[in-house]
Image (tube, rainbow, N blue to C red):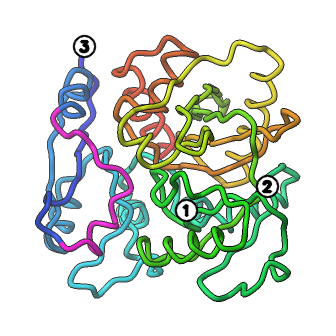
Amino acid sequence: MEIDKYIEIVTIPENTLPKKYRQNVGITLDIPIISEVLRQRYEKVSVSVIKTEDDLKELVLKKPNLVFSGIKYFCFNDQNDVADEDAWFSNFLAAHNIAYIGSTVRAYRNSYNKTLAKQIVQAAGIKTAHSFTTQPDEHTSIQSLPISFPLFVKPASGGDSQGIDANSIVSDFKSFQAKVLGIYKNQQRCSLVETYLSGKEYTVGIFENRADEKLTVMPIEIIPSKNKNGHRILDYETKKNDAEKVIAVTDPQIHTLLSGLATKVFKALEATSHARIDIKMDEHGVPHFLEGNLKPGLGKGYLYRACELNQEMSYEQMIYKITDNALAYHSN
């Protein structure tokens, strides 16, 4: 029996807008697949393509029970800026009493800026690698670096491992300068530089159940292939080509350690609904927070594999859990 709810899937036009505008998309949804899944459970499901502010006004008039979308914010005609709270889609929906999937703007801001996220979790007593931010020519000598080699260099914001490659692990000042300059030129961002953690890599899927306010915590281990330098790092090309292996965490002690750390991070970042928390071990097997992804992809990527390996959850069940939790959260 279908549930008497109206779900609106919201997206923007494909491949017709400038790059700056498309940065407002946190995750790209496979609309046909998501639509088919939701139509099996809910009475009414339709799709809106937002091109103008008038399209947003029309969305409000439709009065959906829930908006299912990967959009973060809008910047019509370059008039709105990401710093403008009113430009954020979730704030717009909340102002019109429309439920949406995912966390609040505050939580997204906490997680998107990787430096801020590390500061927040450190304040909560959670281990994370020592770090600093930099840009080209800011640190002009090896003596000016606040932490010692080897270092891991990545963009200070953004996702999908963009800007991470075999050259991200640096062991000398020349390599450090080259990587920082490359990130600035290619990603137009400053760099986050961390103490390199050489241990195993994990990600932890989390669902918040609004009925009892309990968290379902689902760790998995990610094993990238060795790169040209003999390192196993989860870089952009590895993710893009699905070249990594993903396995269940079967050691009870490690499962408990990862689950506890991820739970603390989820709460510290003020996340709601669902998230993915990335964790890496140091050389002694001590887990450290890497990043928090509060808009994890909703294809058959890491979040789905965490659900499947930990809960034997189908893809459809994952989508329903996200949707039902959002409906419950906004009805409270």
Q: Amino acid at mark 1?
A: Tyr
Magenta span includes 203: no
Say above or below: 143 vs 64. Answer: below
The residue positioned 68% from the left and 50% from the top of the image is 290
Q: Does residue 14 appear to the left or right of 329 in the view shown?
A: left
Q: Position of residue 326 (x, y in %)?
A: 45, 40
**Mark 3: secondary structure:** loop
Which residue occupies 46% across, 15% down? 313
Task: Check if residue 24 falls in the magenta segment.
Answer: yes
- Residue receiving disc 1: 112
Give the residue pinned by disc 2: 129
Q: CA distance from mark 2 to mark 1?
A: 17 Å
Can you say whether 190 is above or below 297 in the image? Answer: below
Tell me the quarter of the image containing the N terminus. Answer: top left
Tell me the number on the disc at residue 217: none
Q: Under tag 1, what secondary structure?
A: helix
The x, y position of residue 218, in whole percent, is 62, 25
Q: Nearer the viewer, mark 3 or mark 2?
A: 2
Question: Label 3 amino acid?
Answer: Met
Select label 2 or label 1 by which is in front: 2
Which corner quadrant of the image does residue 8 belong to?
Answer: top left
Query: x, y percentage for residue 153?
Result: 63, 63
Residue at numbered disc 3: 1
- Tag 2: residue type? Ala
Q: Earlier in the sequence, mark 3 or mark 2?
A: 3
> At 43% from the left edge and 71% from the top edge, which residue is drawn?
187
Among numbered discs 1 and 3, the one appearing first in the sequence: 3
